[in-house]
Amino acid sequence: MLQNSRERILSASLDLFSEKGYKSVSTNEIAEKAGVNEITIFRIFGKKKNLYTEVFYSFRMKPDPQDFLGNITYIPEDDLRAFASAFLKLFICNTKIVNMSFRVVQSEFREIADELKQQIMDISSIIKPYFIELKSRGLLCSDDPGFLAVLFTDMLFGYSLQLLKNGKLDILPSGIKELCSVFARGIINNR
Amino acid sequence: MLQNSRERILSASLDLFSEKGYKSVSTNEIAEKAGVNEITIFRIFGKKKNLYTEVFYSFRMKPDPQDFLGNITYIPEDDLRAFASAFLKLFICNTKIVNMSFRVVQSEFREIADELKQQIMDISSIIKPYFIELKSRGLLCSDDPGFLAVLFTDMLFGYSLQLLKNGKLDILPSGIKELCSVFARGIINNR
DNA sequence: CATTAATGCAAGTATTCACTTGCATATAAT
DNA sequence: ATTATATGCAAGTGAATACTTGCATTAATG
């Protein structure tokens, strides 16, 4: 390759698709942003739809259980912070993919639309055994550790999303600490 | 009016715009769904952009402070549940508007893009005095009641969003109860 | 040097789509 | 009955856009 056109097209497409969705982005626009002739796009990717799905799958990062479960201490507050830290790291890497997911038209790209939902469920599943273990150690006051895993994940997601929409994701969110403290105090059995 | 074309167009547009965004929906498609001639759309709304913004502003529901603060008991768990209930009611009325907000292209409809963010901030502001009052009564263990208001709102939003994406919003979310219990225990001063 | 692969350029095609115009028609109001 | 209003229908316009074809050019490779 002369100038690595393929990667430049993918990168430009990621930016544009995440900002404007599929239909609002023209191949011409992508070509300009990538510094590439429009025809090159069709030579490499065939058609726009292929480019779109390829962008999604090549930039998407999946959660790695080790990032979440690597340093468990069974001190809930610390562990939740570790979870939150792993989650945020993943979320930050995936912001553009998250935006693509929210913009995608379900009837046209069903697989892509379901991915984000699936990934969040995956994260819940990764941390679920931890909550079960807490329960079996008698540390939880709730009867449903599985639900707590979902709740904590969704809470993280919602909060991260708000940070993203408010453009405050780049700042290290000190609030995350407080969030984990509140949640930890809320679930432990303090007798 | 013969058949109330205006409202039928608005209603059809809301469905389509919320499912597919702006660019992916054609005026022809809207006309068919509304059972109306395409030209009628242009006669009433002038151009597509006007229709889009008019749909947004005519279906949007703003939070009413009274819904949140009407029945305060200063029993945190009960109050948080009342907040959650008011939030959910509003969220359910606004699901299509929420979808529109997530799909909107910021550079083309900035006002609309900022509305959702603003509404969530509004809700935080509505319940913030409650948390401040809790603090002054010595019930809070946190030093930042304002942040707790934001956190609780974002958590509700994130959780509701997940319910929506998973198609489980119509079921009465029993999980919301647990969520409020956890949060209430997490913030109160138990000495 | 010769070959091959990647890319650019010019021009074009077919389609979709927002939006317009002119005229006919049906209904409601006066 | 007449006027005004709302709507439908036929036809069309101009622009944007995805995608194609044929040829030239450049650069890397053998």
Image (cartoon, coloured by chain):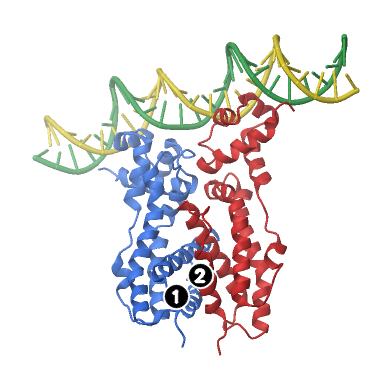
Chain colours: A blue, B red, C yellow, D green
Does residue B80 lie above or below D23 as drawn? below
How far apart in space, not on screen, are marks 1 and 2 (Cα)?
A: 8 Å
Residue in the foreground of this view, choosing between A66 and A120: A120
The disc labelled 1 sits on which kind of residue?
Ser
Tell me which residue sits at (40%, 54%) in the image. Answer: A116
Q: Which residue position holds label 2?
A: B178
Near mark 2 (Cα within 10 A), the count class, few <14, some 14-19 or many ≥20, is some
Question: Residue B141 in the image: x percent, y percent?
Answer: 57, 84
Marks 1 & 2, CB-CB < 8 Å contact: yes
Front residue (pair B59, A162)? B59
Q: Is residue A109 visible?
A: yes
Examine the rendering and report whether any part of residue A9 can be seen: no
Q: Is residue B152 above or below residue B61?
A: below
SS category of the residue bearing label 2: helix
A150 relative position to B156: left or right: left
Q: Which label belongs to residue A110?
A: none
Check disc 2 and give the amino acid type. Glu
| Camera-nearest residue between B85 and B30 | B85
Report x, y in % for residue B21: 53, 41
Q: Position of residue A10 (x, y in %)?
A: 35, 46
Look at the numbered disc 1 and give the secondary structure of its residue. Answer: loop
- Which residue in the structure is indicated by mark 1? A142
Quarter of the rendering containing residue B78: bottom right
Chain letter of disc 2?
Answer: B
